[in-house]
C-alpha cells in the first residue's frame, strides 16, 4: 500500500488537531457554563396567555438560542413553582416571577417565604408598565385625586383587587395616601378581594366596586367603549414610573398612545407615599434559583443575558409586546429588589 504523500499527511494531521482543539474548547465551555441541556423554566402563573408566560417565553427562547440548549416554560403557578425550585439543586429548573414573589411574603400569604433568604435572586429581565387602576366611565370620580378626596370626606371607596401581591400594592398605596392627607379616614378605602382580571372587571360591571386594579393590556379595550355601555371604563392611575412609560413605543397599546398613558402617571397623577415622595411601582420580572445551585450557572445566565441584551433584538420583541427591557445582573438585581421590597414594606406597615 502506497504511503500518503507528505502534504496530504500534513493536511489530515491539521484537520485532526483542529477537531481535537474544537472538542477541547467545547468541553471547556461546558465546564465554565454548566447550564443543563434541558432547562425547565417554571413561572408563578398558571396562565399561558398572561404577561408572565409571554415575557418568560421571550427570554427563554433567546437564552436557549444563545446557550444552544432546550428551554421550556412551564406555567405551574407560584406554589408549584417554588416547590419545583426547592427540589432542583442541580440547576435543571429555574424560575421567572415578578414582584409578587416578595410581596406575597410581606402580605403574609401562605406559602410565600422570604425569597432573599431561601433562594438566590437572579437577574431582572423586563418591566410590565401596564399596572393600572380604573373606574366606570360614568363614575363621579374624574381622577385619583377625587377618589382620595372622597375617602377623606367619608365616602366608602370599594377597590377590587386580587389580594397578596402586585394587585394589592397599589391599593395599599392608595389607602396610605388617604391616611397621609386625611388621617383616620383611610378606613374608607375598602378592599373587595377577588381573583382573576375577569372577576375584577365583573365587579365593576355589576356596580360592586368603585375602582378596580387592571392593566393597560387587559382593560384598554374597555376604555374605548361609549359611556352608556355597562362595560365602559376610564383609567385614573398607572403605577409605573414616568420614565418607564416614556420607554414604551410611541403607538402605546391598542388605540391608547404613549402620550395618552403619560396622563395617568406621576407627576400628572400623584399618590403621596410620604410628605416628600409620591408612590410609583413597576412590575418587574426576574429569575429565582435554588440556593444550592452551582454559582457557575448563575454567572453563565448573567453573561448570556448581558450579551443578548447588548445585541438588541430582544428589546424590540419585548417592546412590541408592551414590555420594557430591563436587564440587571444578579448581584445588582439582588440589591435593587431588596431595597424595593423594604420601601413597600414600610407602606404596608403604615396601614396595618
Image (cartoon, rainbow, N blue to C red):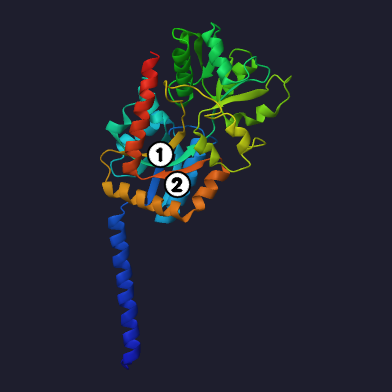
Inspect this view and state whether residue 4 appears.
no
The residue under the point 73% across, 24% down is: 226
Which residue does the numbered mark 2 point to in the structure image? 60
Disc number placed over residue 286 in the picture, else none: 1
Q: Secondary structure at mark 2?
A: helix
Task: Name the foreground residue: 278 vs 240.
Answer: 278
The residue under the point 31% across, 49% down is: 299
The residue under the point 64% across, 24% down is: 234
> In which quadrant is the N terminus drawn?
bottom left
Residue 338: x and y in percent read 33, 32
Dot 1 surroundings within 10 Å: few (below 14), some, or many (20 or more)? many
Mark 2–mark 1 distance (CA, rounded to whole Å): 12 Å
Residue 136: x and y in percent read 64, 19
Residue 105: x and y in percent read 35, 24
Dot 2 surroundings within 10 Å: few (below 14), some, or many (20 or more)? many
Which residue of the protein is positioned furthest toward the front in this rendering? 276
Which residue of the protein is positioned furthest toward the top in this rendering? 154
Q: Is residue 90 left or right of residue 348?
A: left
The vertical placement of 237 against 334, above or below, is above
The residue under the point 39% across, 55% down is: 67
- Contact, mark 2 vs mark 1 (Cβ under 8 Å): no
Residue 148: x and y in percent read 53, 15
- Pair 2/1: label in front: 1
Inspect this view and state whether residue 90 appears.
yes
Task: Name the foreground residue: 170 vs 72.
Answer: 170
The vertical placement of 168 against 125, above or below, is above
Q: Of the two numbered discs 2 and 1 on the same chain, state the one appearing first in sequence.
A: 2
Q: Secondary structure at mark 1?
A: strand
Please tell me in which quadrant of the rendered image residue 184 appears.
top left
Disc number placed over residue 331 in the picture, else none: none
Task: Name the foreground residue: 265 vs 310.
Answer: 265
Amino acid at each position: 500500500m502506497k504511503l500518503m504523500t507528505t502534504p496530504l499527511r500534513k493536511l489530515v494531521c491539521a484537520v485532526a488537531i483542529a477537531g481535537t482543539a474544537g472538542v477541547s474548547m467545547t468541553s471547556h465551555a461546558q465546564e465554565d457554563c454548566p447550564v443543563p441541556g434541558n432547562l425547565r423554566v417554571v413561572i408563578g402563573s398558571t396562565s399561558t396567555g398572561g404577561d408572565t408566560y409571554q415575557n418568560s417565553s421571550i427570554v427563554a427562547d433567546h437564552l436557549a438560542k444563545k446557550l444552544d440548549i432546550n428551554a421550556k416554560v412551564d406555567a405551574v403557578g407560584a406554589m408549584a413553582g417554588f416547590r419545583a425550585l426547592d427540589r432542583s439543586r442541580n440547576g435543571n429548573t429555574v424560575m421567572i416571577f415578578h414582584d409578587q414573589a416578595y410581596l406575597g411574603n410581606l402580605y403574609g400569604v401562605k406559602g410565600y417565604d422570604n425569597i432573599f433568604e431561601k433562594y438566590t435572586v437572579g437577574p431582572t429581565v423586563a418591566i410590565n408598565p401596564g399596572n393600572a387602576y380604573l373606574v366606570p366611565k360614568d363614575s363621579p370620580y374624574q381622577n385619583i385625586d377625587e377618589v382620595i378626596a372622597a375617602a377623606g370626606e367619608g365616602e366608602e371607596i370599594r377597590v377590587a383587587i386580587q389580594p397578596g401581591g402586585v394587585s394589592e400594592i397599589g391599593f395599599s398605596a392608595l389607602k396610605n395616601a388617604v391616611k397621609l392627607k386625611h388621617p383616620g379616614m383611610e378606613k374608607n378605602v375598602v378592599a373587595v378581594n377577588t381573583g382573576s382580571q375577569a372577576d375584577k372587571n365583573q365587579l365593576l360591571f355589576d356596580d360592586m366596586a368603585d375602582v378596580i386594579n387592571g392593566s393597560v393590556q387587559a382593560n384598554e379595550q374597555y376604555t374605548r367603549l361609549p359611556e352608556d355601555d355597562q362595560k365602559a371604563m376610564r383609567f385614573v392611575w398607572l403605577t409605573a414610573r414616568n420614565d418607564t412609560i416614556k420607554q414604551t413605543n410611541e403607538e402605546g397599546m391598542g388605540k391608547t398612545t404613549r402620550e395618552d398613558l403619560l396622563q395617568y402617571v406621576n407627576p400628572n397623577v400623584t399618590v403621596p407615599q410620604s410628605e416628600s415622595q409620591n408612590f410609583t411601582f413597576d412590575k418587574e420580572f426576574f429569575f429565582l434559583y435554588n440556593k444550592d445551585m452551582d454559582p457557575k450557572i448563575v454567572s453563565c445566565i448573567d453573561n448570556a443575558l448581558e450579551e443578548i441584551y447588548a445585541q438588541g433584538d430582544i428589546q424590540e420583541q419585548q417592546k412590541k409586546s408592551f414590555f420594557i427591557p430591563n436587564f440587571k445582573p444578579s448581584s445588582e438585581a439582588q440589591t435593587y429588589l431588596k431595597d424595593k421590597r423594604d420601601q413597600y414594606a414600610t407602606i404596608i406597615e403604615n396601614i396595618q
